[in-house]
Amino acid sequence: MTAFLFALARVAGVLLAAFAAGWAIARALLPRGAAFRLERAGWAFAVGISLLAAFVPLSAWVGARPGWMQFIVLAGVGLVVSYTFRVSSVELGEDFGQPEPRDRRPATLVLGVLIFLGIALYALRALTEPMWSNDFVAIWGLKGKAIALSGGIPGWMRESPGFAHPEYPLGLPFLYAGIAFLTGGWDDHAMALLFPLLQVATVGVALGWLRRRGVPPAAALLAAAILANFEPLYSAFLTGLAEVPLAFGALLFGTALADALDPAETGALRRLALAAAILAATKNEGLFLAAVACAIGLALGGRRRWRIAAAALPTALLVHLLHRLWRGRLPLRDFDLGLFSLERLRESLATAAAVLGPSGGIGLALALALGLLGARRRDALAPVALAVCAAAAYLLLPAFAVRGPEWMVHTTLARIGAALAPLAAAGIGLGFARRAPLGAAPVHPANP
Amino acid sequence: MSGTTRLRLAAVAAVLLLLLVLLRGVPPLGEIPRRIRSLAAFAPKELAVRRLGGSGTAFDRRYFSFLENARRRLPQGTSVVFLREVPPDETHLFLATYALAPRVVAMGGPEPPLPGSAVAVYGRQPSASERAYAVLPEGFLMLGVPR
């Protein structure tokens, strides 16, 4: 076995163990049943990698070097809690939730092959060489490596070096370090396996959720095929950066928000709270998305509005607060609120249009057309509104950029905008659901 | 607009979007075999060699070799590394910071070097007046000594 394959097998083993723990814990998030299986697999992966990230600071907090024992204890606590608060099974509706006869229509097969090829191609791109992008080397990988090799959180990460953005959340570096602690060494090549798996989880959740919510198989597969082959997000360059995990987290968050609008949905509020924490731990805009979701919940949530708002924001605030307690208040290094002017905003928008280019413009127009052709559903509006608010913020923020709007748009807009694709696809796709009622009817309506 | 027309239009738009995504995502001819060849050639080698042959060091492969050699020769307990005669751009600094993590890396540094720190000089061999701790093919290392 080659050096790389051996390291890859170790990372795969750690991720499999985390997934297994996540699968068991996910009983507190989603009901059992065939209709939920793909989604549950995605949430299980999210829970698993959250455990891998969380056991690092928790170990540091109790003064222990992170290792298998700490991971097992944390997973065990999660298992006990999930067993106590598991989501009740649901009564399946008459037209969903049952295994379907194998669909062998040519279109289904072609779309299935395209999804497979998209995943295989990204896996090859991600795993060709050790993760190498500037932002991996200067920010995400640097912090992960420093934590892993020093056996804790180095003090210098609180404030320096400036280019490593100490004001960014530490979820992804903790995840890298967690994998390194459990595999017994830092291997930034084998660790890239995380990224194709994040892609698989994203595509799986999108497909499973759209099917469960009543979107026809061909439409759900089309959405999944578009996502699986979406190169602006699943590229060699973005491997190692926070955009791919953020896209996954945003999809989980958006789907949970749409579910939470339905009083019959079981576990949706818990999923919303967990996804909010994942988002806030991944990138600073996670807190912004949580605040927007809180507002959406208040606007669209009807009688459940306060419960939705209470699920969407506090966990994100808690993650932010924990960072704040550790490192103090740090300014956003790239921005200065005093710099805003209409001229800079115009410059930002003009540069964004240039960066988008003709093909990007056509793609955006097609996505917009799909959004308009779908049904006007309150629940579909939620993920779309989240994506639109995030996109608006991404267009506005360069007007505050210290190094100028043009520089910021050129260096960041395409990749951070691409991270919204799964969220937007879920919202747009839901517009084509055949079933008006949202989710499953709970056996025990008392479940949140 | 009837429901059927709406759905047909949506199907056309979705297929067009898929085609657009595929057009953008399909790699240039030769990329896949090139990646497979590269993976097969480097997979048996150690991690540092894989990074040396990768995209992240293409801007100055000799520099990464220097950093890796320096890393292997640094005494345990070295907490700070000062880089000298390294091109003063971000790319060189980022790679050094990453390669030498968890140590703190900075350009320049005081003279004589601080106790507990090391100085990595890139691109030349030590002069007669410089006390090298280790001479590397691409430069040399000096250590800060207690005063």
Image: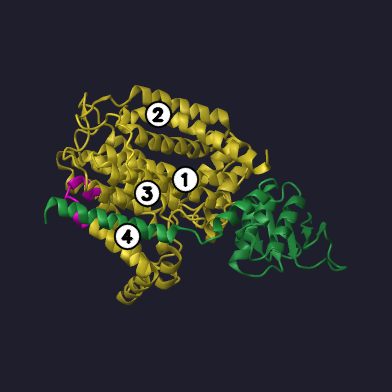
Chain identifier, colour green: B
Residue range of the region highlighted in magenta in the rendering: A371-382
Amino acid found under the numbered disc labelled 4: Ala
Q: Relative to B67, is A323 above or below? A: above
Label whose residue precedes the other's in the sequence (3 or 1)? 1
Residue A9, percent from left and from top: 59, 37
Asked if the residue at tag 2 contacts the one at tag 3, i.e. Cβ–Cβ closer than 8 Å, the answer is no
What kind of element bears circle 2? Answer: helix
Which amino acid, by three-letter code, is at mark 2?
Ile
Spatial CA distance of label 4 from label 1 is 22 Å
Circle 1 residue: A171
Q: In this structure image, what is the colour of chain A?
A: yellow
**Residue placed under numbered mark 3 in the picture:** A225
* Residues behind callouts 4 and 2 on a single chain: yes
C-alpha gap between disc 2 and disc 1:
20 Å
- Residue at position x 19%, y 42% in the image: A434
